[in-house]
Amino acid sequence: MGHRPRAARPPRGKADRHQGDDGLSEGLTYPGGAEALIAHWQQRRAPLDQAPGESLPLAADLAALAHQPVLPEPSRPASGQSRKLQELRAELAGQSELALLNALCIAHLRKRGFPPEAPPLFRRIWTEQGEALLKSLDSRWLISSIITFADHGETEAQRRLGASMQVLFSLMKLYEAERLHSGHAPQQPFRLNRRAAAPLPLGMTGFSIASGGLDVNLLAPIWDEALRTPVAGPLACHLLERMNADPGTVFRRLAMMREALKARKAAGTAAAGLQSAGKAQQP
């Protein structure tokens, strides 16, 4: 029997020729698939060890901590928790000890193992002092807080809302970071007449900027659930309101492109009307 002919392959560019050099297997974004991806994820989730006496203060006076500023402490690299606390104290200088305790709980809860008091303490912080933290934390720590509810919310509604917000903000961070390499500012929408003639991945149908409702269908259910969910809901609403007011998101750029399309259509309609009127006045 003869050999089967090999399928023709497109010419390989420089990036393709070096795929083997950087470990990418042929045709795969993540070499090794699910097994390798999950193993890498688990490496990043190694628990923070604690030295004796370093348990989290489950019964702490949270109201008092909200008014106590974060102060530097002498180096105590006795454990993973103490090293993390050093990092957090430097990052949260000027914030409150309540913000620091919230951040430490999040640092533990991102790992695959954590102290048993971490989940109830995190939930207590946001139940009792959520309003104070909404006024003081920056968006980074607010986002870290809401996505922590995905695994550690007290109710199914809190966990579902946290998971939705995690997907939303993680994807936003990915595509906005990639977009910076286009050279366009976040507030600058793409030009309407420079669309590439290429299909969407996975055979997905296209999205109509002028009349499509994908952005509404994505955001409205999340926002609706946030309005009805205790504890995690006000945090999610606060972040969605910040996103709505931010001029540098894909949602704002799409809105600007829609307005440009409407203006173009209105101008075309007006021009057609003038042309029709001109023809009607001809003898």
Image (spheres, grey):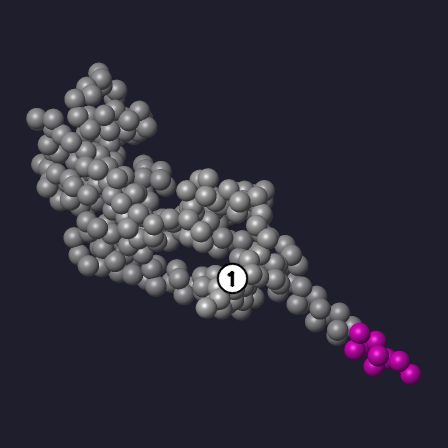
> Would residue 51 be seen by someone viewing this image from the given angle?
yes
Q: Give the camera-side residue of 263 and 248.
A: 248
View extreme (front): residue: 1
**108 in magenta:** no
- Residue shown at 30%/47% (left/top)? 36
Within-10-Å neighbours for mark 1: few <14, some 14–19, many 20+: few
Magenta residues span 275-283
Q: In which quarter of the view is residue 271 placed?
A: bottom right
Q: Residue at x 32, y 36 (%)?
A: 136
Residue 276 lies within the magenta run? yes
Magenta span: predominant SS is helix
Q: Residue at x 78, y 72 (%)?
A: 274
Provide residue 186's location: percent of width, then percent of height. 53, 45
Q: Amino acid at mark 1?
A: Arg
> Circle 1 sits in a helix, a strand or a loop, which is it?
loop
Residue found at x 10% / y 41%: 116
Q: Which residue is mark 1?
A: 6
Left or right of residue 115: residue 33: right
**Residue 265 vertical placement versus 186 (above, below):** below
